Amino acid sequence: MLPKISYADLRIMFFSGLSGLFMSMSFPKADLNWLSWFAFIPLFYVINNIKPKKAFLAGLSFGLVHFLSLLYWIITVLNIYGYIPFALCLPILGLLTLYLALYPAFFSWFLLKFCKKPGFLILLAPPLWVCLELIRTYAFSGFPWELLGYSQHNYIKIIQIADITGVYGLSFLIMLVNCSLFSLLLFLSKKPWQGHRVTPGIALAHVAAASVLFALCLIYGDFRIKQIDQWVSKAPGLTVSVIQGNIDQSLKWTPAYQQQTILKYNRLSSLASADSPDLVIWPETAAPFYYGNDKALTHLLMQGLSSTGRDFIIGFPSFVQKQNHFDFYNSAILLDRDGAIKDTYSKVKLVPFGEYVPLQKYIPFIHKLTEQSGDFYSGQMGETLDLDKAVAGVQICFEVIFQNLSRAMVNNKATFLINITNDAWFGKSSAPYQHFSMVKFRAVENRRSVARAANTGISGFIDPSGRELSLTELYTDAYVTQTIPLLDQLTVYTRFGDWFAFLCFPMLLFAFLARDGNDRFTCEKGPVK
């Protein structure tokens, strides 16, 4: 028999699900970024004065609604390109979202269990949320897709603090504002938090703290943008063209279509050469063959390079032959105008089930979604490509959502960043827009320009302050040329990484120990539903 669901349970699931929906609508495509500043209020409202296990259910409902509505496009990837039956795609998405939903579930449980007095809400909730985001970034190979702070990607002034705190600083601030607004609502409505009254002093302190920090972030953002613009005006430039071939994913690896793919990229590169670029960039695995191994396609590509007369960075599959096997890589190869290989970067952060199968020994019936034989191997973290005029840090596909990879490249003297990707997997869903929204933070965190070449879009450029430049539309044949500044200054974030996120652990511990003063283990209990 199915467990009986009471009206109280339905109420909990409704309000927590509403919070999850507000969260999803803060991200692309809806891009109602302002919703995130109060998205958690329905969740806080519904977990007030209930049992901790009910709070866990509320957080789980929040997470399931949020991640299902955010990541629905995974079904398209699995079904259309992975050839997995639709009936199996749903449980796969369900398992992923259930895992991700455990984070807000624990968040809600912890708050209800240990935050007994309203004054400690803003001391516990923001660092707790950031700690959980940091764990999600690295646990089980990591999946930091659209962390809370990424919802502000369109608000250029507010995201400038990322060059100090990374995206986690924005997550902290957003959660702080949610807590302060909730405290104010409790005070105005004369409702207690877990049986404890919200005094005017508590409400005022919460709102004042959030307002001051928000204002300081805006002031810093305004100052920093002006400073970066001055740096840019004095910096040397590099003229770069990015090519968007718009190749159908289902045809890309078809032998009969490979020649047409190279001819299309050659043609677009020839058109771009009229802008006199120093460098031409093709997307991830834009050349669907092994360079130098397939003589006919290699010769065809070299003809295009020589006629254009530019240096190229092109996405290729590559391999290294060992004694009795081959090691395959997803690579970006720097070629000169004669087709000679000058440098190579191989992808470090591989996509589970896309480029390798975790625990394949135990689940042999699961296969990769990519067409190449064998699992890919990881490259060396922090490797860069040395051009004559600049040093490029390349991130392939979803590598760009991992902050530590771009940091490693900038610390290895990268003067600009490149993201090559093939977002054709995502179709016309919200995923390409979500992917692009996170790229902006890599520019701000490290104060580097980003050149992005995507097979089906979004291609273009982002300046060191996170502003969008010369973007393409999805599913169009296109090329874009832009002169980008080459900066060499190192930010606080580049030097010290996720120091702020790690600092949230002792902050959380301090708030936890201090939360009830001398009555740490006893508290006045309110009504429990």
Image (spheres, grey):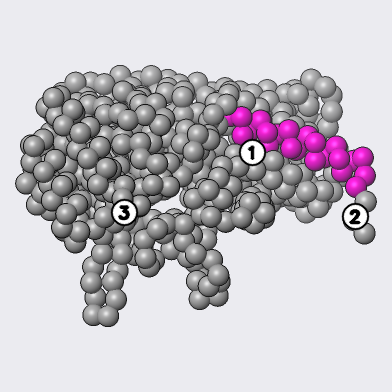
- Residue 242 is labelled as none
Q: Secondary structure at mark 3?
A: helix
Image quarter in which the C terminus is found: top right
Membership of 12 in magenta stretch: yes
Which tag is nearer the camera, tag 1 or tag 3?
3
Which tag is nearer the camera, tag 2 or tag 3?
3
Nearest the eye: 309 or 401: 309
Q: What is the span of residues highlighted in magenta in the rendered image?
A: 5-26
The image position of residue 451, as x and y in percent, is 28, 34
Nearest the eye: 283 or 189: 283
Nearest the eye: 274 or 147: 274
x 31%, y 50%: residue: 256
Q: Which residue is mark 3?
A: 255
- Amino acid type for the residue under numbered disc 2: Pro
The image position of residue 40, as x and y in percent, is 68, 33
x 46%, y 36%: residue: 432
Upstream in sequence: badge 1 or badge 2: 2
- Residue 3 is labelled as 2
Going by the image, does 444 lie left or right of 237? right
Distance (Cα) linking label 1 and label 2: 25 Å
Upstream in sequence: badge 2 or badge 3: 2
